[in-house]
């Protein structure tokens, strides 16, 4: 049979289309609610799946019944139930992908394919449930399937676009999609019937029309109840969700208006920010979405801070704290942050919502408050460290004192509290002084002055005092704060200043009495001289003022000498040296000179002060010593010559006298007498040489040996400096009287000190010391030179024995003899590479 036998009932088909539209609309409404709400997702999915599945089954069932009601004669209820379950199952699988946040095209493709399979499966199982033999027109069957698939794909694409999902403005889309889906199901069923060749089974059982109609109406009634229940449930749920959405929108609006909101995925990638977030961060939504919060990291917090944050929220707990962030323009802002994790069924976070409040102003206020508090503490601390503070009531009773007050007054805090300031009154000031003080502060005015107080131990101290009255609302003092600074040292300094001025005047007087002083301007013109200058130069003050020092030039020094002098002082450096000047009467005198430049702010000299000391006598002594050195050289030559001549003369004289004893010839005796006379004459000449070499006869006088040593040390100081030797003299007494020949002792000291300097070719230290030991004065001359080996130490003082390459040994011999002539002794101590010490022991003159 090419068609089903029976009469077509259009009202069944219309009812089927209506029920299918209602079911499709309800199903789509529930699936959209799943996408837009996080509540009752399971119930919505179950309701939507049942609604869509039953709608497809009703369309198929009613379509077949509308064609021929007699088909119910052999209808199998179990197969019908199976077709409903299969249709519901395919529908459920079709809409499972729509749970994802983002819809892809392959989701729509799979969903449409599964819905198409649901339609085909219900149709095929429904035909078999009516016990009908079928054959298919394959091409038409495939065309029908493709048409149904395309309709489903188009409808789902309208409701669930792949690019962006819009949660609102779907009122017209749902009915249109429901009509398209219903139409596709109806048209699909019609085409499937066209593609199907029906044949009645032999087992067809005749049933009355009354039973068939009753069964049809029962099915329609049940379908209407089921679909109606689903529609009512959908409507109630929609209203409830709409109310919830309204509340959520209100809450969101309130949050957006008052707080900074951001939503991130489980990995911390930002998926949503509100306007407040954009406003405070200076980033737009396009710049921030897809990034994580490192983009606003200010670097203020440590890695441990963020590790603790992530540990908290990843464990599903809420994190609260304060974070400093960095805006796009580089400015910093503080936010009070609450991060709430949203968990899935397994308790794992699926997203995080961060709600922040801008607390930058509060943090700034806190910082300013802390700084102000710290500043107050610092001022109080500084005040307590530097000043003496006391607070009294309006009657003058002490209520508070700091440590400095106790420290300077020597009273404890317990002894001072409750007392008035009479406890430290020194009696130095008059009663009128304190009356004026109280009158000033009693009127609410600040009093300042200097007060002398007395400490507990009786000592006096001065304080610079400021007393500040604090006034009540009536303008009357209710307490006084006294801030004092210890000026005892300043007061003492003032007293010392008076003494210092007098001392300076005394020093100036002493300088004028002892030294030759002259001031010159920057060009060297003499502006001031003292009496000593006039005395030694023989010029009056009037004759010398306005002149330069060329008036005293003796012509002794070269032009380079004075050029170097002026170059030194012109650079602002002190010049020291010895100058020979010429007095008005033509006599020459030597001065040890120190010229000190006084410089201005630019470092240029504006005047010079020359301080001179007369060293004419010292220079004369140096000349005498120089001549003595020359004579000593001649004496050394004479001693050498005499030594070489005397030995052969002695032999000649001895042999001549021996020959004279055995000679009887008068003529020969005469010749021998002539020889002896000539030998005696030569010996006399040799004796004259020896007298030149010998020290002069000792003439002892009582002298103070200390200045003698100082004089020699000062003479050799320059030579020591040239050889990088530090020469020093130590003596614990100013006067040590001995019997001596001053010049000969000088010769000894000069010889020993020179030897010490020459023993240190690379420089070193040479110390001269004196001390009294058992009525003897011991003079030690110690160097840090090369030292003398023990085998050579024993031969020191022998004639013509020396440790120096150019010496002749006579210097030490003469020195030892001079000390012996003074009833003294010389002890030499030496060690190679550690130095040598000459110890001179001379009898001291006892009082």
Image (cartoon, rainbow, N blue to C red):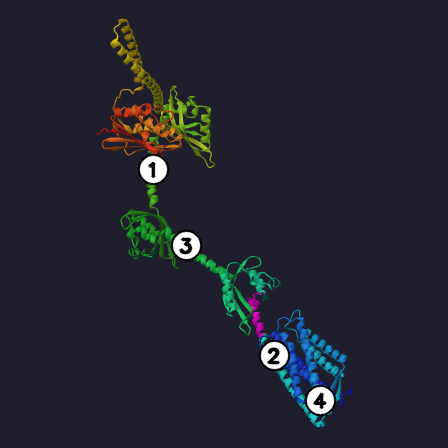
Label whose residue precedes the other's in the sequence (3 or 1): 3
For the residue pair 244 and 385, the one nearer the viewer reads as: 244
Q: For residue 499, which quarter of the picture?
A: top left
Mark number, residue 146: none
Judging from the image, what secondary structure is the residue with disc 3 in? helix
Q: Is residue 305 left or right of residue 399?
A: right
The CA distance from mark 2 to mark 3 is: 69 Å
**For this view, does 36 lie left or right of residue 204?**
left
Q: CA distance from mark 2 to mark 1?
A: 107 Å
Q: Are marks 2 and 1 in contact (CB under 8 Å)?
A: no
Residue 784 lies in the magenta-colored region:
no
Question: Which is more toward the observer, 257 or 140?
Answer: 140
Q: Of callouts 4 and 1, which one flags the residue occurring earlier in the amino acid sequence?
A: 4
The Cα atoms of the two marked residues, 4 and 2, are separated by 36 Å
Quarter holding the N terminus is bottom right
Label of residue 44 in the image: 2
The answer to whether the residue labelled 3 contacts the one labelled 1, judged by CB atoms less than 8 Å apart, is no
From this view, report whether residue 389 is shown above or below residue 117: above
Horizontally, residue 255 falls left or right of residue 379, namely right
Q: Secondary structure at mark 4?
A: loop
Give the residue pinned by disc 4. 131
* Mark closest to the chain's N terminus, 4 or 3: 4
Residue 421: x and y, percent?
30, 53
Q: Which residue is mark 3?
A: 378
Quarter of the image that includes the C terminus: top left
Tell us which disc is closer to us: 2 or 3.
Answer: 2
Mark 2 neighbour class, 10 Å CA radius: few under 14, some 14 to 19, many 20 or more: many
């Amino acid at each position: 049979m090419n068609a089903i036998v029976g009469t077509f009932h259009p009202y069944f088909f219309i009812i089927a289309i209506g029920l299918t539209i209602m079911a499709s609309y309800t199903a789509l409404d529930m699936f959209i609610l799943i996408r837009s709400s996080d509540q009752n997702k399971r119930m919505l999915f179950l309701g939507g799946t049942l609604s869509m599945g039953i709608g497809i089954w009703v369309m198929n069932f009613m379509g077949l019944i509308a064609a021929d009601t007699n088909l119910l004669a052999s209808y199998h209820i179990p197969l019908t139930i199976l077709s409903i379950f299969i249709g519901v199952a395919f529908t459920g699988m079709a809409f499972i992908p729509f749970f994802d946040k983002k819809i892809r095209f392959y989701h729509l493709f799979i969903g449409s394919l599964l819905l198409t399979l649901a339609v085909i499966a219900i149709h095929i199982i429904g035909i078999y449930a009516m016990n009908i033999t079928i054959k298919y027109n394959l091409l038409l069957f495939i065309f029908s399937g493709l048409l149904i698939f395309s309709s489903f794909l188009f409808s789902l694409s309208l409701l669930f676009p792949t690019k962006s999902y819009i949660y609102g403005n779907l009122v017209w889309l749902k009915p249109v999609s429901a009509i398209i889906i219903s139409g596709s199901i109806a048209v699909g069923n019609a085409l499937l019937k066209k593609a199907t060749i029906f044949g009645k089974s032999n087992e067809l059982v005749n049933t009355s029309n009354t039973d068939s109609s009753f069964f049809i109406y029962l099915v329609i009634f049940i379908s209407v109840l089921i679909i109606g229940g689903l529609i009512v449930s959908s409507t109630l749920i929609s209203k409830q969700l709409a109310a919830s959405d309204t509340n959520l929108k209100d809450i969101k609006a309130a949050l957006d208006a008052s707080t900074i909101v951001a939503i991130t995925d489980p990995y911390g990638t930002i998926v949503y920010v509100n306007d407040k977030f954009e406003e405070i961060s200076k980033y737009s939504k396009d710049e921030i979405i897809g990034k994580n919060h490192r983009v606003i990291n200010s670097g203020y917090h440590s890695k441990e801070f963020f590790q603790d944050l992530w540990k908290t929220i990843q464990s599903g707990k809420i994190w609260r704290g304060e974070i400093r962030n960095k805006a796009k323009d580089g400015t910093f802002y503080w936010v009070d942050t609450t991060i709430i994790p949203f968990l899935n069924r397994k308790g794992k976070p699926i997203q995080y919502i961060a709600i922040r409040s801008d607390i930058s102003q509060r943090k700034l206020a806190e910082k300013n408050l802390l700084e102000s508090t710290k500043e107050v503490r610092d001022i109080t601390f500084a005040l307590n460290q530097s000043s003496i503070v006391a607070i009294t009531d309006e009657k003058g009773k002490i209520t508070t004192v700091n440590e400095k007050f106790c420290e300077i007054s020597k009273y404890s805090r317990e002894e001072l509290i409750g007392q008035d300031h009479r406890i430290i009154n020194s009696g130095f000031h008059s009663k009128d002084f304190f009356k004026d003080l109280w009158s000033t502060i009693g009127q609410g005015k600040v009093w300042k002055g200097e007060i002398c107080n007395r400490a507990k131990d009786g000592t006096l101290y001065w304080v610079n005092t400021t007393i500040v009255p604090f006034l009540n609302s009536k303008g009357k003092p209710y307490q006084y704060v006294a801030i004092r600074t210890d000026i005892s040292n300043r007061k003492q300094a003032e007293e010392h200043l008076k003494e210092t001025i007098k001392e300076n005047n005394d020093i100036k007087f002493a300088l004028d009495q002892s030294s030759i002083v002259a001031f010159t301007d920057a060009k060297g013109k003499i502006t001031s001289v003292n009496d000593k200058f006039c005395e030694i130069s023989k010029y009056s003050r009037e004759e010398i003022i306005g002149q330069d020092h060329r008036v005293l030039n003796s012509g002794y020094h070269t032009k380079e000498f004075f050029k170097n002098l002026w170059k030194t002082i012109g650079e602002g450096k002190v010049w020291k040296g010895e100058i020979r000047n010429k007095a008005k009467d033509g006599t020459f005198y030597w001065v040890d000179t120190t010229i000190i430049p006084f410089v201005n702010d630019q470092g240029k000299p504006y005047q010079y002060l020359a301080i001179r000391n007369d060293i004419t006598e010292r220079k004369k002594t140096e000349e005498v010593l120089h001549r003595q050195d020359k004579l000593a050289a001649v004496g050394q030559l004479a001693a050498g010559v005499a030594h070489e001549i005397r030995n052969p003369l002695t032999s000649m004289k001895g042999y001549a006298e021996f020959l004279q004893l055995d000679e009887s010839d008068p003529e020969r005796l005469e010749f021998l007498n002539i020889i002896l006379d000539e030998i005696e004459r030569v010996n006399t000449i040799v004796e004259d040489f020896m007298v030149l070499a010998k020290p002069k006869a000792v003439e002892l006088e009582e002298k103070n040996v200390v200045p003698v040593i100082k004089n020699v040390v000062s003479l050799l100081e320059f030579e020591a400096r040239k050889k990088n030797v530090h020469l020093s003299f130590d003596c614990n007494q100013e006067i040590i009287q001995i019997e001596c020949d001053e010049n000969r002792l000088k010769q000894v000291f000069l010889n020993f000190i020179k030897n010490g300097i020459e023993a240190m070719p690379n420089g070193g230290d040479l110390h001269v010391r004196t001390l009294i030991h058992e009525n003897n004065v011991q003079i030690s001359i110690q160097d840090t030179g090369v030292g003398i080996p023990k085998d050579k130490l024993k031969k020191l003082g022998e004639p013509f024995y020396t440790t120096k390459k150019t010496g002749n040994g006579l210097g030490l011999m003469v020195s030892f003899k001079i000390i012996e002539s003074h009833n003294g002794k010389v002890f030499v101590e030496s060690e190679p590479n550690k130095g040598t010490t000459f110890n001179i022991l001379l009898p001291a003159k006892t009082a």
